[in-house]
């Protein structure tokens, strides 16, 4: 495959908010050597670089005056087979849900709770995607990256990736020069359902298959989350805030029905959806940007919204949650200005 280079390229199909913006250049590579070639060309263009996955966590606030890079590396290899597990190496450009489906089909288990998450394999390792009782870092063994600064390939073991809730070392500004080439997942060949998330705990573990979990998760997601093909959105716009135990206790005494979840020592995770809901935002809109009526963590493009309009709504939500609960919501979505 050859490197794909497009000028004045529409990004509408590359961002799940459906923002109708242009990139000065769009470059898509299908192999490591093509990425090196792209980077060497880009160094001559003297313009900013933005690496995207499926664009499910981005909010474009205007045309992008620079080069947008995208991986189309789609290799899938089984590197090791043991009695009860396999090590699968997946290219960063594989669609996440196609990957989950393929793994289940091959009899490789552990990712079924993460069915239906929009995005690609590369971003799964950057965002540490998580849902329905599973975080992908539990299954990641190593991440292969290209260091844009040195031109060298480097392998990060999972314990070097500083994984946390929706967090990894690859999100830090001083690690932005790493581009994920492939991710190695340790998957089980013996199916063990994870049913810790409340709605899944109602399933009968007897004779349950990975496809049963997948179907249940897909139907839960469909019932709560808008389809980006119909209503532009980037999933949860905000992260669930993690606060000190003392703050959580004082909130619990004022709001006894407030959901609280265990986090790392000394901290408690709160529900952003619950707080936004209690501030009365569900189903409200500002201009063409709205708070989704069935899941207030999700901001939606009601049709032709600008990035700035979505950001104005996000700031209004953040302000009102802070005023009522004294808790600062942090966006999970990255706003791109250029
Ligand atoms: N809630 C309300 N009102 C609502 C919806 C929810 O009060 O309209 C409260 C309920 O009390 C509920 C609580 O919020 O128990 C939590 O809701 P839910 O279980 O749906 O999970 P979440 O915190 O809203 C997180 C992830 C989702 C993931 C689900 C399921 C984040 C930021 N979001 O949402 O991830 O699918 O858990 O595990 O952690 C995404 O990242 O795009 C995403 C959708």
Image (cartoon, grey):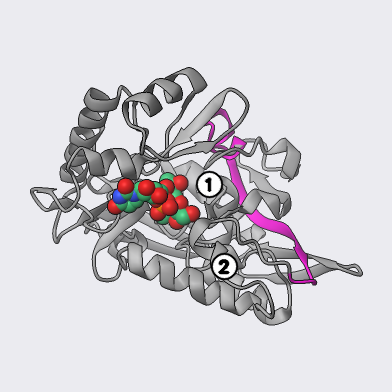
Q: Position of residue 215 (x, y in %)?
A: 51, 77
Residues rendered magenta in the picture: 169-191
* Residue 123 forms part of the magenta stretch: no
In the rendered image, the residue lying farthest to the top is 246
Estimate the spatial distance between the alpha carbons at disc 2 and disc 1, rounded to whole Å.
15 Å
Out of 53 and 231, give the one closest to the viewer: 231
- Residue visible at 86% across and 68% down in the picture: 84
* Residue 174 forms part of the magenta stretch: yes
Q: Horizontally, is 326 left or right of 70 in the view?
A: left
- The answer, for residue 317, to whether it is visible in the render is yes
- The answer, for residue 52, to whether it is visible in the render is no
Quadrant where the N terminus sits is bottom right
Quadrant where the C terminus sits is top left
- Label 2: element kind: loop
Q: Horizontally, is 97 left or right of 305 in the view?
A: right
**How many other residues sit within 10 Å of disc 2, few (<14), some (14-19) or many (≥20)?**
many
Q: Horizontally, is 294 left or right of 69 in the view?
A: left
**How many other residues sit within 10 Å of disc 1, few (<14), some (14-19) or many (≥20)?**
many
Q: Position of residue 306 (x, y in %)?
A: 16, 49
**Label 2 CB-ligand 1 distance < 8 A:** no
Q: Position of residue 47 (x, y in %)?
A: 39, 40
Q: Position of residue 118 (x, y in %)?
A: 45, 63
Name the disc covering residue 127, or none: 1
Q: Is the residue 247 above or below the residue 270 in the image?
A: above
Name the residue beneath numbered marker 2.
Answer: 94
- Residue visible at 91% across and 70% down in the picture: 83
Quarter assignment of residue 33: bottom right
């Amino acid at each position: 495959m050859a490197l794909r280079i497009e000028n004045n390229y529409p990004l509408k199909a590359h961002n799940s908010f459906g923002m109708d913006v242009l990139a000065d250049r769009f470059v898509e590579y299908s192999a490591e050597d093509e990425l090196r070639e792209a980077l060497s060309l880009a160094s001559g263009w003297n313009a900013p670089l933005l690496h995207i996955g499926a664009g499910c966590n981005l909010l474009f606030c205007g045309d992008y005056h620079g080069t947008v890079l995208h991986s189309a590396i789609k290799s899938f290899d089984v590197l090791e087979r043991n009695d009860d597990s396999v090590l699968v190496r997946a290219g960063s450009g594989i669609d996440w849900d196609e990957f989950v489906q393929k793994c289940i089909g091959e009899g490789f288990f552990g990712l079924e709770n993460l069915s239906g998450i929009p995005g690609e394999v590369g971003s799964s390792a950057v965002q540490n995607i998580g849902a329905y009782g599973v975080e992908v870092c539990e299954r990641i063994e190593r991440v292969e990256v290209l260091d844009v600064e040195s031109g060298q390939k480097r392998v990060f073991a999972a314990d070097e990736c500083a994984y946390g809730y929706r967090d990894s070392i690859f999100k830090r500004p001083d690690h932005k020069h790493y581009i994920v080439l492939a991710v190695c997942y340790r998957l089980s060949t013996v199916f063990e359902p994870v049913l810790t998330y409340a709605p899944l705990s109602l399933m009968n573990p007897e004779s349950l298959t990975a496809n049963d979990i997948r179907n249940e998760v897909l139907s839960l997601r469909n019932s709560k989350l808008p389809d980006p093909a119909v209503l532009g959105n980037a999933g949860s716009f905000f992260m669930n805030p993690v606060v000190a135990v003392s703050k959580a206790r004082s909130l619990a005494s004022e709001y006894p029905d407030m959901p609280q979840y265990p986090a790392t020592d000394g901290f408690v995770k709160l529900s952003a959806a619950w707080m936004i809901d209690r501030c009365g935002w569900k189903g409200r809109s500002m201009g063409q940007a709205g708070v989704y009526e069935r899941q207030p963590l999700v901001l939606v493009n009601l049709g032709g919204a600008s990035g700035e309009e979505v950001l104005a709504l996000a700031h209004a939500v953040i302000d009102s949650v802070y005023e009522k609960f004294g808790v600062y919501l942090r966006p999970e979505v990255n706003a791109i200005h250029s």
